[in-house]
Image: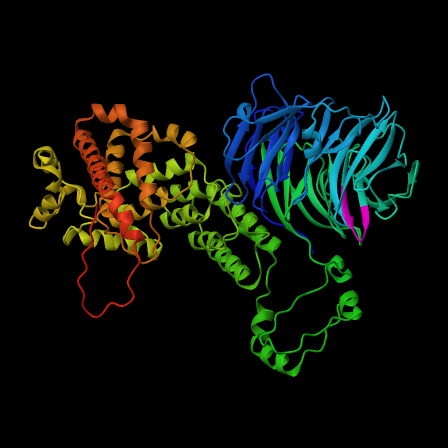
Amino acid sequence: MAALYEGYTLCGPVPAQTLSNSGVQGIEQERDSDHVVVTDSTRCVTLYKVSDQKPLGSWTVKQGQTLTCSAVFNSQTKEYVAITDYKVIRIWKEEDILLEKAFKATVSSDVWKVHCVDGAEPVVLFQKGAVRLLDSLLSAPQQPIEDVLSQEEAIRWSANIVAETQQIVVFTTEQKGDHFLYLQRLNPNTLQRYRLEREEPGVAPLSFSASYRDKHIRLLYLYPNGHVYQSVVSVRGLATEEGTQALPRSLLLALPVGEGPLEAASALHLDEAHVAVVGVPHPSAGAGKDFLCIWNTNFQTLQAGKEMAGKIYGQLWCYSNKLFIPHGKSLSVIPFVCPTSSLAYALGKLKQAKTEDSKAPASVPSWNNILHGEKAQPSRMVEARKTRTTRKTLSTPCLTTDQVLVLIKTAPVEDVQKEVEGLLSRSDLQPSVGRLVSVLVSRSLADPAFYTPSTLAQLVHTRGLCHSVCPDLVLLALERKDYFLCQLCLQFFPDIPEAVTCACLMTFISMPDVDAEKGSLEPDSVSFMETLIAQERGQVGLQNGFSPPSLDEQHSDAHRGGDAIITNAEGKEKTSTPTEQMCPVGLHKAVLLNEVLQTAYSDTFLLPHLKDLSSQHVVLFLQYLQFLYLKFAQDAVPQMGLRSPNLAQIMDWVCLVLDAHFTVLVMTPEAKGLLRNLHNFVKSQVRLVSELGKIESSLQELNKMKEKRDIGQYSIEVIELF
């Protein structure tokens, strides 16, 4: 059966959002299945990486200008195309920062939309029905544009379809209550017009979608009365038919509408047997709730449903088995699957049994099995193996996911852990893991005596969760001092907000080392820190002749010249470990701080929360960052593939903390030595780079030299450097 997986939030409210408008004008797939371009209804275009829920780039037009068409990505030229103020075509690349400096051209007629499918040239559809290829239009932007539509006819929806290597622009229009379908083929240039059958007087379709299959274009449209119709047009007949043809239709679905007609709803083809519908009530849910549903059109059955919180705006996009839905104050992404349909699946009576022997022949269910529940005779081998567990299975029947969800709300901790772990061991919980965690977290917040740390950790380990699915999970783990669960969430959740990241940082940096050492943490990250801390007792190594000098030694560097670095390093071998090279926090505390350093963030959103740290904690955090920096600078980091932050992440956090607290640190006596050390570290690195720069040309010449093949066991070579 079709299934809707746990969704996640791609972005929050866009600036153009109002009570009646989602603020999202359009969503287009970009270079691959993991990138989309979101255009708001006023001035901004944003590129998102879907899996990370992070913006990769954003472009905004000037105040007073308006985006009147959703931006598209031209895969041929790697450029973006959008329309402002109906007549200005704007084209830019990802590295462009300001749209005002990008290419723009003004055309002679108002543009309805730009369409572009992967691998094809963009197509421009004008408001009066004319169509031009983008390159042809840009060769003469002020060329006259003919009026295809009558004066009172207006476009309501459009799409671009590739059929048999040919681009076909599909659009619908409305004129005095009548609706028409246009099919514009570009090569050869032919136009076909069809009249849609009327539904009820004064009733217009709420949404359209089109798909191409088996040499036919299939138009899907939803009416406010819940009727979903499909009209099929043959591609082969486009060049021969003339005039306005009547467009036959067939009723695909009759959806429940509840107390009144639908106001904001949309239907979308997913495949030949499934339709996604948003904004239509669930047949078994109460009034006032909006759902995203997947219906099987072959058997007229509802196969998956998900309640959508907040207002529904009747918008729905589908790319790469992901549904994009604006609702409430967010734009959500809902992954889905639509396996091949069968009557057995539709009846809900096809059971997939896993045999212990992969070589044993699978039993084929007969109609008696499906309709009347008669059991097929198992093979002797399978039957013999099942006898060992028959009695146990009969005495402890397996609960379904829905039954476990009900049990979580009232059962003791031991029973809940047992049933959830049993569910994990025998089924794929990807579609329902979010619901399980949400119910567990809700009860844990309401009941201080209830908490299932091992169960929550197992569910997080499935990697079927993200922060937007269970936003209270990390805060619950912090409240219960479950630092292992915190660590797992920081590792596996790609969308943790900056406020939650800072909450974790403040908790970790302020807690006593004794509390941190009580629990167990992820072994690889612990091993990494154990290695670093163990090196405190060993020698201080050198990396390319560089060992960060101590404070006193730095004061005399100006008098001793460039050899001070090596001299200082050699001197340190005879002295005890300097304070800055000793880890200022305990082992487990350091491991947790490392997880924070590796969490994705945006500088803009993180800085305000960093300012909430106290000066004492800021100094301690900077001391720890200094310790890590020294270890990386001395090449003392173990190269064993262990989970650890990298040097770039460490330096980024140093800069962020200094930006947020520099004034306070300057006025704090305890921080002066730390700031002086950080300054000296930077000075040492600059000096090292400067010295390397002096021999850069010589190193380049060495790299160009060809290695001699005939070299014996011993040889002496003289290399002259000029």
In terms of image quadrants, where is residue 201? top right
In this figure, which colouring scheme has been used for the structure? rainbow
| Residue range corresponding to the magenta coloring | 210-217
x%, y% of residue 685?
22, 39
Task: Look at the image and say whether residue 211 sits in the magenta stretch.
Answer: yes
Q: Quadrant of the C terminus?
A: top left
Q: Is residue 165 above or below residue 91?
A: below
Q: Residue at x 26, y 48 (%)?
A: 699
The residue lying toward the viewer, choosing from 716 and 88, is 716
Question: What secondary structure is the stretch in magenta mostly built from?
Answer: strand
Q: Quadrant of the N terminus?
A: bottom right
Q: Is residue 625 left or right of residue 136?
A: left
The residue lying toward the viewer, choosing from 316 and 187, is 187
* Residue 447 appears in view: no
Q: Is residue 282 above or below residue 457?
A: above
x%, y% of residue 489?
43, 47
In terms of image quadrants, where is residue 319? top right
Q: Is residue 648 left or right of residue 107?
A: left
The residue lying toward the viewer, choosing from 392 and 138, is 138
Farthest-out residue, top? 64
Q: Residue at x 39, y 41 (%)?
A: 479
* Residue 362 appears in view: yes
Task: Look at the image and say whether residue 341 sits in the magenta stretch.
Answer: no
Q: Is residue 245 above or below residue 459?
A: above
In terms of image quadrants, where is residue 197? top right
x%, y% of residue 165?
74, 48
The residue lying toward the viewer, choosing from 237 and 8, is 237
x%, y% of residue 279?
71, 37
Q: Is residue 214 above or below residue 30?
A: below
Q: How many marks?
A: 0
